[in-house]
Image: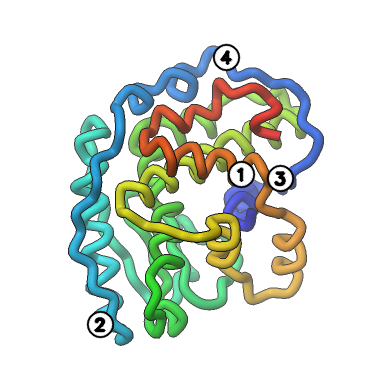
Amino acid sequence: MMIRVLAATAAGLMAFSGAAAAYPVKGVPELTHNALYKKGKLPKISCKLSKGTTKSSTTTYLNTLVGCLNDAWGPFIPDFKPVKTDIKATHDKGSCYNGIEITGSFATSCYTQLQIQLDADWISAKDDLPILTQVAQAWSGVVMGQTGIGAAYWGMPNDADQKQLEEQGRRFDMQRLCLSGVTLKALGAKSKNWKATLKAEEPTPKDKHWRDRFSKDKLSANDLYWFTQGYTKGTPGACNTWKAPESKVA
């Protein structure tokens, strides 16, 4: 998936799906036994969302959505810091910018902010499912950041082994997808074909070089498996990819 490649690019490496070796995660309880997994089902999010087709109404919609996510996820995370939106026409600067320009709208987490590049595609959209889908994936970064999962992932040993790095990256990104499923379930979002929805709403780079590289990273059966786990069960406990067998993160 493109989000996976973006994260890998920011770290100075490129992780594509491939044959996986066995690298069980040990000695990192923030990943394998995080307190988040015991929090139970995320309650239904009662969020009064009204998506208009103007920049102003879409901005209000996004701010309302993020406010609802703060309210829903806050009780699940100790010392939770409410997230603010940073909505701009272009996000091409700052500490979270990885140098890849994106066409159209997209959302990504950046510390205690949700950075949103708002363009005509989201403004004119009458169906908000694609927007919900991408914001939910960005929100997973918030959850993983504020529960210590993100820091534990970046700090875990890998013995400079490329295949180990790739497997760890897949576990991280499949957990991100799973948590987005939890969020979308609580929001009451529905799709007749989640695979198509997830793939269609991936951000598109402006540069052909990056578009070609991203196109090689497909939504795998295991990606969809973990998203479905989160969506059907509705609990973060369904998203512990760190204890999953290698066959489920290949």
> Do the residues under discs 4 and 2 have CB atoms within 8 angstroms?
no
* Callout in the foreground (3, 2): 2
Cα separation, mark 3 vs mark 2, equals: 38 Å
> Do the residues under discs 1 and 3 have CB atoms within 8 angstroms?
no
> Do the residues under discs 3 and 2 have CB atoms within 8 angstroms?
no
* Callout in the foreground (1, 2): 1
Residue 115 visible in image: yes
Left or right: 49 as drawn, with respect to 6: left
Left or right: 214 as drawn, with respect to 112: right
Task: Report the residue marked by disc 1.
Answer: 223
In the figure, residue 138 lies in which quadrant?
bottom left
In the figure, residue 127 lies in which quadrant?
bottom left
Cα separation, mark 1 vs mark 3, equals: 14 Å
Q: Nearer the viewer, residue 245 or 173?
A: 245
Cα separation, mark 3 vs mark 4, equals: 21 Å
> Do the residues under discs 1 and 4 have CB atoms within 8 angstroms?
no
Q: Which mark is residue 56?
A: 2
Which amino acid is tagged 4? Answer: Lys
Specify which label sits upstream in the sequence, 1 or 2: 2
Locate residue 98, reporting x and y percent: 56, 59
Give the residue displayed 30% in from the left and 86% down from the top.
54
Task: Report the residue marked by disc 4.
Answer: 26
Which amino acid is tagged 1? Answer: Asp
